[in-house]
Image: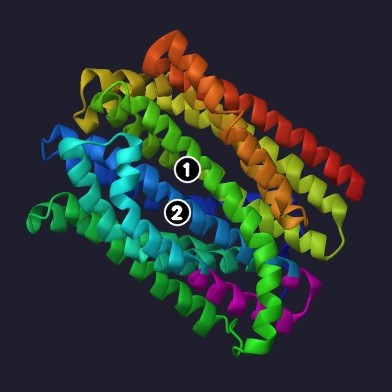
């Protein structure tokens, strides 16, 4: 019988161990994106940073969709594991992995054909447009590979397999970092080399994920179409809200990129650099959001609501401590960090602003991550969808518009900060009310 590890022992200890291991892997993956930016900056072409910024807005959409599908896989698996039903666990894993591939494939094809249109809508033009197009047309076909590999990671987190989840992401990140200079400089492929390295890293992640889930843990059952028709409906009930929830963020990022484009390539480049620093610096929060769900899901499956409440409390405490440390470090190292990217003075000013205080928005983004994870695993996934679309609409557009009116490109960042406060606190209030009702 599959053991429900999170229903016993210290919640704080589970959070620390799993978040620590997951953070290690995520830092490596996000660091590879940052390394992309660094190596491409060495090519000395100013439009490259802007091209990566435009492309990043679209790639964020694809990655967020994969994260949403992995959340669904993790939620269904953790609940089945919490109930102690091994057969239900293997079915949840099998059909979730198949569903992730099936749902991403048509989106992948559609996006590939829409790349030129989407770049134009974001405001890309000239050399930046051409470079971004080359980058995306290579990476986007690997979307299904990323979705299945990330869902495999969701299974590992649902089981409490800290090392497996860590090495899944580490394998991809290390591959990307090693291949970047070889493809970009050694093979003289430029931005296309960075894209090719990303694709290879995703295949490495897929191979490792399937090895652990299928071969080592024996968590895949025989595929039966009649059973799948029933399971797919359960998967969709969680996957659709989870995907919509995660897609709200890249929509917001795309809007900010569009706004920055009005101030030129330097503003887009500055925002692109910030977008690469954020996930590396705050990888712990992204990791924590991936752990909160399985812990809450197992205890919800075991009908232990008091431990779900404790999960929320300990997660908030960990978020506050983590953000205090990271934001302080960003402030201290900014004189060394910002010049690394060979960006223009205007771009650097935006990055300095982020390091000088705007980074504190992740205290409230962290609250949103945590509460979304709870909603997705407590049978109310539509709550997270509502909260996140409020974030991308009410919590982003008007605040950024006012910020730009008051302070140009820098004002846009302050607008994002203000909006994150409102949405983060709203999600927390809703989560506390939900847990009180369940208790």
Q: Secondary structure at mark 1?
A: helix
Q: Is residue 393 above or below residue 130?
A: above
Q: Which residue is mark 1?
A: 250
**Image position of 184 (left or right of 288):** left
- Asked if the residue under mark 1 is in contact with the one under mark 2, i.e. CB atoms within 8 Å, the reply is yes
* Residue 403 in picture, x, y percent from top left: 48, 15
Q: Nearer the viewer, residue 163 or 351?
A: 351
Q: CA distance from mark 2 to mark 1?
A: 9 Å
* Residue 293 in picture, x, y percent from top left: 68, 55
Which residue is situated farthest in the top direction here?
A: 406
Q: Residue at x 49, y 22 (%)?
A: 400
What secondary structure is the magenta-colored segment mainly? helix
Q: Is residue 65 above or below residue 328?
A: below
The answer to if 405 sits in the magenta stretch is no
**Image position of 219 (left or right of 311):** left
* Residue 13 in picture, x, y percent from top left: 68, 51
* Residue 28 in picture, x, y percent from top left: 38, 52
Q: Secondary structure at mark 2?
A: helix
Q: Residue at x 50, y 50 (%)?
A: 23
Q: Which residue is mark 2?
A: 63
The answer to if 94 sits in the magenta stretch is yes
Q: Residue at x 35, y 26 (%)?
A: 260
Specify the quadrant that holds the N terminus.
Answer: bottom right
Q: Nearer the viewer, residue 340 or 248?
A: 248
Q: How is the image coloured?
A: rainbow
Quarter residue 71 falls in: bottom right
Q: Residue at x 44, y 33 (%)?
A: 255
Name the mark on residue 104.
none
For label 2, count other residues whose C-alpha is less than 10 Å away and answer few (under 14), some (14-19) or many (20+).
Answer: some
Magenta residues span: 80-102
Residue 8 appears in the picture as rendered: no
Residue 152 appears in the picture as rendered: yes
């Amino acid at each position: 019988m599959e053991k429900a590890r999170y229903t016993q022992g210290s919640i704080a200890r589970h959070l620390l161990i799993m978040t620590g291991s997951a953070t290690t892997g995520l830092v490596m993956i996000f660091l590879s994106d940052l390394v992309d930016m660094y190596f491409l900056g060495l090519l000395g072409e100013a439009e490259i940073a802007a091209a990566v910024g435009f492309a990043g807005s679209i790639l964020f959409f694809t990655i967020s969709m994969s994260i949403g599908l992995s959340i669904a896989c993790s939620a269904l698996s953790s609940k089945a594991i919490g109930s102690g039903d091994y057969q239900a666990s293997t079915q949840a894993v099998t059909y979730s992995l198949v569903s992730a591939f099936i749902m991403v494939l048509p989106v992948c094809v559609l996006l590939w054909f829409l790349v030129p249109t989407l770049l134009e809508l974001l405001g890309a033009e000239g050399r930046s447009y051409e470079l971004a197009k080359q980058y995306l047309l290579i990476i986007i076909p690997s979307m299904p590979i990323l979705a299945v590999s990330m869902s495999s990671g969701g299974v590992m987190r649902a089981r409490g397999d800290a090392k497996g989840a860590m090495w899944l992401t580490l394998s991809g990140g290390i591959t990307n970092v090693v291949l970047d200079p070889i493809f970009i400089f050694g093979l003289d492929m430029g931005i296309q080399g960075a894209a090719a390295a990303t694709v290879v890293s995703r295949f490495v992640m897929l191979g490792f994920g399937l090895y652990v889930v299928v071969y080592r843990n024996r968590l895949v059952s025989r595929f039966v179409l009649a059973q799948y028709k029933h399971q797919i409906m359960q998967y969709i009930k969680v996957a659709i809200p989870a995907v919509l929830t995660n897609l709200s963020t890249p929509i917001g990022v795309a809007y900010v990129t569009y706004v920055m484009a009005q101030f030129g390539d330097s503003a887009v480049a500055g925002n692109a650099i910030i977008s690469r620093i954020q996930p590396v610096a705050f990888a712990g929060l992204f990791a924590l959001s991936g752990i909160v769900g399985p812990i809450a899901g197992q205890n919800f499956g075991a009908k232990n609501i008091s431990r779900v409440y404790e999960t929320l409390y300990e997660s908030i405490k960990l978020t506050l401590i983590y953000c205090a440390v990271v934001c302080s470090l960003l402030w201290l190292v900014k004189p060394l960090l910002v010049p690394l990217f060979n960006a223009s003075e205007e771009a650097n000013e935006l990055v300095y602003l982020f390091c000088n205080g705007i980074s504190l928005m992740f205290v409230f983004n962290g609250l949103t991550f945590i509460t979304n994870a709870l909603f997705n695993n407590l049978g109310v996934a539509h709550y997270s969808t509502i909260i996140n679309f409020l974030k991308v609409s009410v919590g982003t557009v008007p605040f950024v518009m006012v910020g730009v009116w008051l302070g140009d490109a820098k004002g846009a960042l302050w607008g994002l900060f203000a909006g994150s406060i409102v949405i983060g606190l709203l999600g927390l209030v809703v989560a506390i009310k939900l847990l009180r009702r369940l208790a």
